[in-house]
Image (spheres, rainbow, N blue to C red):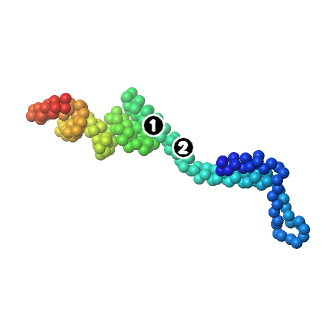
Amino acid sequence: PLILLVVLAGLLLYVGGDRYVQYEFLRSDALNENLKAFTLQALIGAIALATLGVIALWSILVWAWRLPKRMKSGIGRKREENGLEAVEQALLAIEAGDEASALKKARRAHDLLDRPALTALIYAKAAEVCGTPDEAAIHYETLVAQPDTQTAGLRGLARLSQNRDDHQETLGRAQTAFAAAKGPKWAFDLLFNTQIALYDWSGALSTLEAGEKRK
């Protein structure tokens, strides 16, 4: 459409104002009764106005068509901003030991954000601060269920079992994490110390040997 408008503007400059177009409407035998005439400039101007009208109408239709999507996108962005703000406040409350605020902000982040791993971790940490290990365990289990967050979930569950002196469960969590291809150092430390606590000398020696191989 813009190219067409440029062409029409060029034609206006070219034809000048003294060239005419004639047409006949409802032919009659009377001489020149129905013969009409107008300048080429008027014709080109009418085409240009019609083109602008089509562009304006199309723009309005496209704007109206896309409006619901833009509104939904804007609401989604606002929701995500509020969710990330809740995550930030929850982390600060967890670090400060503010139990009530930590759990409240974690719940808000969980409701607003569509990021299950992040909100599960925040919720679990907040539950730990609030002294509700059973609730924390539920969210750590959510992390364990996904391959890319399994190690983080295992560490949280191992910490919970260690806090209640459940050596067998701690041992199982640590063994699972250490058995991974790139088992983290925390899993090695926890596994070895738990085996010592259980007087599992042969297991501890095996863990030391595996740790030496992994440097």
Q: Going 51% across and 40% down the picture, which residue do you hit?
A: 78
Q: Residues within 10 Å of mark 2 (few under 14, many from 20)?
A: few
2 and 1 marks in contact (CB < 8 Å):
no
Q: Which mark is on residue 166?
A: none
Give amino acid for label 1.
Leu
Q: Going 27% across and 36% down the picture, which residue do you hit?
A: 155
29 or 14, nearer to the observer:
14
Q: Position of residue 183 (x, y in %)?
A: 23, 36
126 or 19, nearer to the observer:
19
Q: Position of residue 154 (x, y in %)?
A: 26, 39
Closer to us: mark 2 or mark 1? 2
Vertical relation: 211 (above or below) 10: above
Q: Is residue 14 left or right of residue 121?
A: right
Vertical relation: 27 (above or below) 209: below
Looking at this rendering, what residue extends furthest in the top direction? Answer: 96
Q: Is residue 60 visible?
A: no
- Cα–Cα span, label 2 and label 1: 15 Å
Q: Going 32% across and 35% down the picture, which residue do you hit?
A: 128
Looking at this rendering, what residue extends furthest in the bottom direction? Answer: 29
Q: Locate residue 142: give its quadrant.
A: top left
Q: Going 31% across and 41% down the picture, which residue do you hit?
A: 149
The residue where tag 2 is placed is 74
Q: Is residue 52 left or right of residue 157?
A: right
The residue where tag 1 is placed is 84
Query: In the rendered image, which quarter contains the C terminus?
Result: top left
Q: Secondary structure at mark 2?
A: helix
Q: Residues within 10 Å of mark 1 (few under 14, many from 20)?
A: some
Looking at this rendering, what residue extends furthest in the right direction? Answer: 31
Give amino acid for label 2.
Gly
